[in-house]
Image: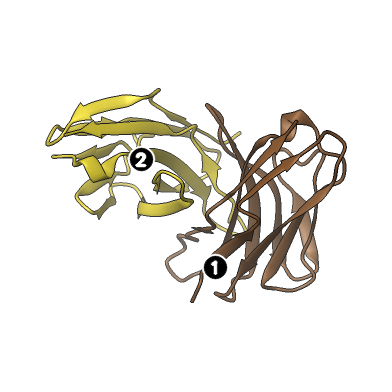
Amino acid sequence: GNSVTQMEGPVTLSEEAFLTINCTYTATGYPSLFWYVQYPGEGLQLLLKATKADDKGSNKGFEATYRKETTSFHLEKGSVQVSDSAVYFCALRLSGGSNYKLTFGKGTLLTVNP
Amino acid sequence: NAGVTQTPKFRVLKTGQSMTLLCAQDMNHEYMYWYRQDPGMGLRLIHYSVGEGTTAKGEVPDGYNVSRLKKQNFLLGLESAAPSQTSVYFCASNSPDRGLSYEQYFGPGTRLTVT
């Protein structure tokens, strides 16, 4: 079946540190990949996405590259801020037909200290 | 444009009681979803709907029922609440788009406690 595996949290960093959150996937087809972010007390919102191999999604200083050869979509940011403290979810969606459902990883809690 | 809204925001139930969670979206989306979020489990799909009058089971449907009588509303019902249903419930919606990304838009969540 389809699954997403994220690095276990929580992750605690100091402001301006480099962030990497690992995400790997297993899929029977050719998926689109997403990172969602959940700020405290809120619902999830899309952070970035990539729909084919070697695509790089980017938003708000975050980046992730779709690596088909390693089935990975690691999230990176060069310099985190306190406001980046949130839970980050990696997700996939199989492309084609009526495949519109998302499969989520378990989430990684990031805390950034000043 | 309110996006996706959920009612109520918080609720405490006793075991065996029933309740209905309401999700409403004003984006004219075809598809709607109910998820539950539990610590260390991520989001798990309960039920979903691909259009008015249609519903389908997701990953963890037991103990829940849903209805989609109007395109903009998706109701999640608990007929006889159990402590295992203590969770945060999220509704989401989307529609097919040309980019094929099918981005889902989420509501703010309902925190349910069953004692």
Which callout, 1 or 2, points to the residue nearer the camera?
2
Please say if A47 is above or below B5. above
> What kind of element bears circle 1?
loop
Residue positioned 87% across, 45% down in the render: B79
* Rendering quarter of residue A45: bottom left
Instruction: Identify the disc placed on residue A29.
Output: none
Quickly name the residue at label 1.
B96
Q: Taking A18 as reference, is B21 left or right?
A: right
Task: Depth check: give the residue in front, B72 or A39.
Answer: A39
- Residue B29 picture location, percent across and down: 59, 71
Quickly name the residue at label 2.
A86
Please say if A38 is above or below A24. below
Cα distance between the residues tagged 1 and 2: 28 Å
Residue positioned 32% across, 44% down in the render: A66
Q: Are marks 1 and 2 in contact (CB under 8 Å)?
A: no
| Disc 1: CA contacts within 10 A as few (<14), some (14-19) or many (>=20) | some
Q: Taking A112 as reference, is B105 left or right?
A: right
* Colouring: by chain
Give the colour chain A carries in the figure: yellow
Residue positioned 63% across, 70% down in the render: B30
> What kind of element bears circle 2?
strand
| Disc 2: CA contacts within 10 A as few (<14), some (14-19) or many (>=20) | some
Q: Taking A42 as reference, is B34 left or right?
A: right
Identify by letter the chain in brown.
B
On the question of residue A51 being in view, the answer is: no
Q: Label 1 lies in what chain? A: B
